[in-house]
Amino acid sequence: MLFFDIFGYQDYSFSLKDGRYVLKILMPGVTKEQCSVSVLGSKLSVSDGHDKWSIELPRQCDIESLDAKLDLGILTITCGQKAQDGRKIEVS
C-alpha cells in the first residue's frame, strides 16, 4: 500500500479498485468517536477531533455511495463511480 504525506502529518493513499474509489488515511490512536467525515459538494473533509483535512473528490465519484470505516488506525473511505452520461445512437 502506497501512502503519501498530503494531510499534514497524516499519510494516505487514493486508488480505484473494482470500480470504486478507495481513500485510506493512517490515523493511529484515533477512535471512531473522534473521527468525523463529511462531504459538501465534491469536497470531502476528515477530522480527528483536533485537525481537519479536505480533499477534492473526482467528479465521477457517486457521493451518495460514500462509506467510511475506521479499523486498526486506518480510515477507509470508499465511493462508487457515477454512471457515465451518454447514450447509444442507432445508425440507420
Image (tube, rainbow, N blue to C red):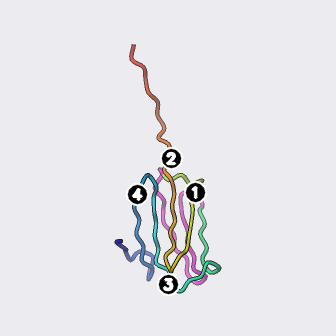
Looking at the rendered image, the disc whose residue lies closer to the viewer, 2 or 3, is 3
Labels 1 & 3 near each other (Cβ < 8 A): no
* Front-most of residues 49 and 67: 67
Q: CA distance from mark 4 to mark 3?
A: 24 Å
Image location (x, y in percent) of residue 85: 48, 38
Q: Which residue type does callout 2 highlight?
A: Lys
Q: CA distance from mark 2 to mark 1?
A: 14 Å
Decide: is 54 above or below 21: below
Judge the density around disc 2: few (<14), some (14-19), many (≥20) Cα neighbours within 10 Å.
some
Residue annotated with mark 2 = 82
Q: Which residue type does callout 3 highlight?
A: Pro
Identify the mark at residue 16; answer none if there is no mark: 4
Image location (x, y in percent) of residue 28: 49, 84
Judge the density around disc 4: few (<14), some (14-19), many (≥20) Cα neighbours within 10 Å.
few
Residue annotated with mark 3 = 28
Location of residue 44 by image quarter: bottom right
Q: Which residue type does callout 4 highlight?
A: Leu
Image location (x, y in percent) of residue 26: 46, 78
| The magenta segment | 40-60
Q: CA distance from mark 2 to mark 4?
A: 13 Å
Residue annotated with mark 1 = 41
Q: Earlier in the sequence, mark 2 or mark 3?
A: 3
Q: Earlier in the sequence, mark 2 or mark 4?
A: 4
* Helix, strand or loop at mark 4: strand
Judge the density around disc 3: few (<14), some (14-19), many (≥20) Cα neighbours within 10 Å.
few
Judge the density around disc 1: few (<14), some (14-19), many (≥20) Cα neighbours within 10 Å.
few
* Front-most of residues 7 and 26: 26
